Image (cartoon, coloured by chain):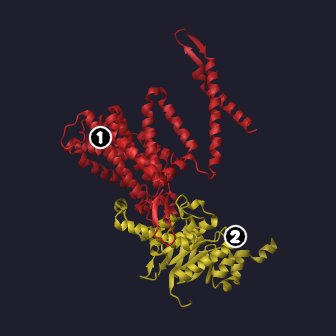
Amino acid sequence: MLVRREFRKSVAVSLWFMFLTFPIMVIRINTMENTIEWRWMNMAYIGAATFFLSFLWRYGMERNAPVKNDTTDSWQERIGRTFRETPRVYYTFLAGIAIVSVIFPLIFSAYQTSIMTTALMYVSLGLGLNIVVGLAGLLDLGYVAFYAVGAYAYALLNHHFGLGFWFVLPLSGLLAACFGILLGFPVLRLRGDYLAIVTLGFGEIIRLILENWNSFSYGPSGISGISRPGFFGMDLNIHQSMIYMYYITLVLVIFTIFVVSRLRNSRIGRAWIALREDEIACQAMGIDKTTTKLTAFALGATWAGMVGCIFAAKTTFINPASFTFMESAIILSIVVLGGMGSIVGVILGAFILILLPEYLRAFSEFRMLIFGASMVLVMVFRPQGLISRVKQHYEFHAEETPSGVPR
Amino acid sequence: MKQMRPVLDVKGLTMDFGGLRAIDEVDLQIRQGEIVALIGPNGAGKTTFFNCITGIYEPTGGMIIIHPMAGESQKLTGLKPNQITSKGLARTFQNIRLFQNMTVLENVMVARHCRTKSGILGSILKGKRTRKEEKEMVSFSYDLLKRFHLEKQVNDLAKELPYGAQRRLEIARAMATEPFLLLLDEPAAGMNPRETRELDRLISRIRDEDGISILLIEHDMRLVMSISDRVYVMDYGELIASGTPEEVSSDPSVIKAYLGESGEEENA
C-alpha cells in the first residue's frame, strides 16, 4: 500500500521533471542547418534518474521520521558520547587535529594553505556570528558589515599612517564592536524578520558607503598594497608570509573557540540563550534586555572585525566587492548548517561550506548546483544542523559540592 | 497576621489600550506573609494587572509602591521588568514560559542573573571570583530544585518535563530571584486534583518557610478558598469585591459576575 503510494508519487515527480527540463534537454536548435533536433533519449534518462532519486529521497525520509520519537541514540549522539565519556579518545583526537593543523602548511602546497587559511577565517567568522544568531537568537543578515569595518580599518590605517598589523588587529576588533553597538541601538526593539531586514540594510549601507565615498575609501577600485604582517622585522617572501598568515589565523581560531566556549557557559552566555528562548520571561527573570542584546552584537562583531583585519593583510588588496550580501549569507549558512549554538558544528559547517566549493572546482559547471543540493539535503534531514548544541551537564552526588562537567 | 505591614500598595491603577480601559482604578494591598488571590471571569483584566505590576505594560495611571523588608518604600511605575525583578518581585506566567531548550538547572541559574555580577571579562578569564560565584549559583539552584522535587531532572531540557513539573519549575525559577513577593498567574491551570493539592501545599510552604507574600490569579475556586487569606474580585477591569474568602463568596455582586443576573436567564 505504502509502496504503491510512493511509487505513484515518484512517477508524478519524474513526469514533472521531464516536463520542466523538456525545453533545455530535449529540444536543440541547430542554427547552422536550421533544423531542430529532438533528443528524446535525454527525456527518458531524466525520467529514470528523477524516479530513482525520488524513491531514494522517500526512503531517506521514511528512515528519518521514526528517529524523532525513538529514544535510542543516533550515530551522531553515539560518537559524541564516546568523545565525551572516554577522555583518552577525546584527547587523542584533539592531539591528532592539533598535529595536522600545525604541520599542514609544511606538507601541502601554497594553494592548499591559502584555501585552508580562508576556511579558518570563516570558522572565526562563523563562531562570531554564532554568538549573535546561535546563542542570542538575533537574526543578523548584515554581519559582513563588521567584517568590512575590520578590513578597512587595517587598510586605511596602514595606508595613511603606516600602522602595523599587530597594532591594528585589536583595534579593528574594538572598532567593529563599536559598530556592533551602533547597529544594536536602533534594533533593540526588533525581533525576527524585522531585525533581519534592518541588519540587511545596515550591511548594504556600509558597502554602499565604501563604494561611493571615494575620498575616504577609494571607491570601487579599493585599496592595494596593504602590508603583510611583520615577523620580528624579517622580510618574508610570498610563500613564507602565506604560511605565517595561516598560523596567525589558526591562533585566532583557537582563541575564538576558547573565548566563545567560556562565554557560552557563563552568566552572560546563559542570559543570551534565555533571550533567544523567551524574551519576556527573560526580562521577568531580571535580565536587562538592552545590555544583553548589545553585548551580543558587540562581541559578535569583534570577531568579524579581527578576521577582517586578517583578510586585508592576507590579500593585501581590498575593495567593496568582497563585502557583499553573499558573504553574510555564507557566514549565516555556516552557522545554520553546522548547528546553531554548537561550536563543533560551526567549525564543521565552515569547512564544508568553504572547502567544498574549492575542491569542487574540477566540476566547475556543477559546483554551485552540488553546493546548493547538499545544503538542501542537510536542512531536510538534519534541520537542527549537523551537530546540535551539547547540554551543559552537571553531576550531583549526595552531600557533595557539585561540579559542572561539560559533556 | 492582621497587623502585618504592607509590602505592596497599588493605588488607582489604570490601564488604557487606546480607547479600551482594561483596568479601571484598582486598589490593592498585600501585607507581609499574606496569600492574596485575584479572581474574576475571563477577560476581567487580571493578567493585565500582573503585567502592569511587573513592568511588561506601563500603566496609564495610578501608583504601585513596594515596601521591601529591608530598605525604604519605592515607586515601581515606569521601571523596566528586569529592574522590578531585582527589586524583589518575581512572577510566573499563565501559559508556561520556560526556556524550553535549556536544562532545568540552567533555567534556574538564569534567574540568578540579577543576584550575581560576573561580567564579560570575568567570564572569559574565569578567575577565582567568577568560579566561586558560578559554584554558588549551581549549588543554590540545585538546593532550590530539591525543594521543588525536581532534583532528578536537573539535566533534562525544560521542554522534556511533564506539565506539572514545568509549572513547579516556573515557580522555582521565580523563587531563584529571591523575591519578597511572588506573583503566580494561574498556577493550577491544567492540573489534575492531586497536582492541585500538591501545589496548595507548595504555595503554603513558600509562604511559611520563606516568609514570601504571594499574589495569585486562579480559577480553581477550591484552591483559592483553601489557601488565600484575602480575595480580590475583578470584573470588566474594575474591582467589585474584596475580603476574606467567606465574605467574597457570599457577596451578591461576585455571584452576579460569575453566574450572570438570575433574572436575565429567566427572561431568555
Q: Does A60 appear above or below B66?
A: above
**Is residue B173 among what the camera can see?**
yes
Residue A94 in the image: state x and y as whole percent. 41, 47
Q: Are marks 1 and 2 in contact (CB under 8 Å)?
A: no
Secondary element at tag 2: loop
Foreground residue among B17 and B43: B43
Q: Residue furthest bottom?
A: B3
**Residue B94 shown left or right of residue B60 in the figure:** right
For disc 1, the chain is: A
Can you identify the residue that label 2 sits on?
Answer: B192
**Residue B149 shown left or right of residue A168 in the figure:** right
Chain ID for red: A
For disc 2, the chain is: B
Can you identify the residue that label 1 sits on?
Answer: A245
Secondary element at tag 1: helix
Label 2, residues with CA under 10 Å away: few <14, some 14-19, many ≥20 = few
Residue B129 in the image: state x and y as whole percent. 35, 68
Chain ID for yellow: B
Q: Residue at x 52, y 72 (%)?
A: B144
Q: Residue at x 72, y 33 (%)?
A: A8
Task: State whether discs 1 and 2 lie on one chain.
Answer: no
**Residue A273 shown left or right of residue A171 in the figure:** right
Q: Amino acid at mark 1?
A: Met
Q: Does B80 appear above or below A315?
A: below
How far apart are the alpha carbons under marks 1 and 2? 65 Å
Q: Residue at x 58, y 80 (%)?
A: B205
